[in-house]
Image (cartoon, rainbow, N blue to C red):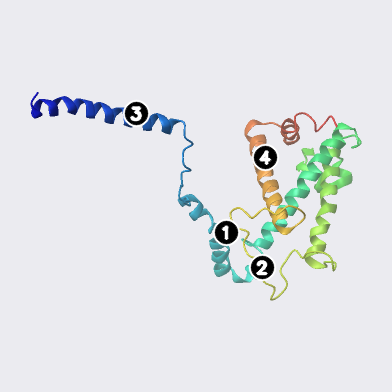
Amino acid sequence: RTPAAASQTSQPRQTMKAALVAASVTLAGAFTAPAPRVVPRTTSPTALRAEPVFEEATAKFKADFPAFNAYGWGVSTKAERWNGRHAMFGWLFIICTGYAQAHGLIPEPDKLLDTSVWGTLAEITPRVSSITNERAIILVANIHALMVSLCAAFCPLPFQDTLLLEPGEADEEPAGFVPPYTPGINANAEMINGRLAMLGIVAVTAYSVGTGTPFLTVVDQLLGGKLYSF
């Protein structure tokens, strides 16, 4: 055999050997735990845009309406906190109203008020219809609850948070798009709960109006029929 023939014979063997080695390495790699993949952390453009929304809104309102902003009116953390408190109390009152209806705690709920006795406050349509006894009782109960906010605005007690900012008092820093969650009774937890309460009232009201379903019926459905049964 000539050297050229030997070389031609060995080339297929070398190619076959290389293929077997590559296959062995590949097969071995299939039984080896893959190395952890390092993915660089990125912030989505939506998050970047959403984060300064509250800061920009409060700064713009402060520049456009400085007199209102000085007392915490308008787009401010003070207003958001108090709106959230009212919404949370609203949900408590909604649950209590459903409980009172279920257990007959409202006397003569369907009786219409006599406008000759109650005057125009009891009228829905002048000289046509009036509100029911149930609606009047709920309205008066809400007025009593409203006194808490009025006291906080005009004559707050030492332990109360004021409804408005005192002269020269700085407002809280904006809580941001998603306030940091801190377990327990604290300002961040109150802000998150207040936002959820406000969002819930808006969502349930929109569904009630859109479908023609009574508000308390929608709440009862969301609670799995437990509102009128507990």
Secondary structure, mark 4, is helix
Q: Of the two numbered discs 1 and 3 on the same chain, state the one appearing first in sequence.
A: 3
Q: Nearer the viewer, mark 1 or mark 3?
A: 3
Q: Of the two numbered discs 1 and 2 on the same chain, state the one appearing first in sequence.
A: 1
Instruction: Check the image and name the residue furthest to the bottom.
Output: 168
Q: Which quarter shows the N terminus?
A: top left
- Tell which of 182 and 88 is nearer to you: 182
Look at mark 4 in the image and give the residue it sits on: 205
Left or right of residue 175: residue 46: left
Q: Amino acid at mark 4?
A: Thr
Does any portion of residue 131 appear in the rendered image?
no
- Rounded to the nearest angstrom, the CA distance separating label 1 from label 3 is 59 Å
Figure quadrant of residue 180: bottom right
What label sits on residue 54 in the rendered view? 1
Left or right of residue 16: residue 175: right
Q: Nearer the viewer, mark 4 or mark 3?
A: 3
Q: Residues within 10 Å of mark 4 (few under 14, many from 20)?
A: some
Q: Of the two numbered discs 4 and 1 on the same chain, state the one appearing first in sequence.
A: 1
Look at mark 2 in the image and give the residue it sits on: 171
User: Do callouts 2 and 3 mark residues in contact (Cβ within 8 Å)?
Assistant: no
Q: Residues within 10 Å of mark 2 (few under 14, many from 20)?
A: some
Look at mark 3 in the image and give the residue it sits on: 23
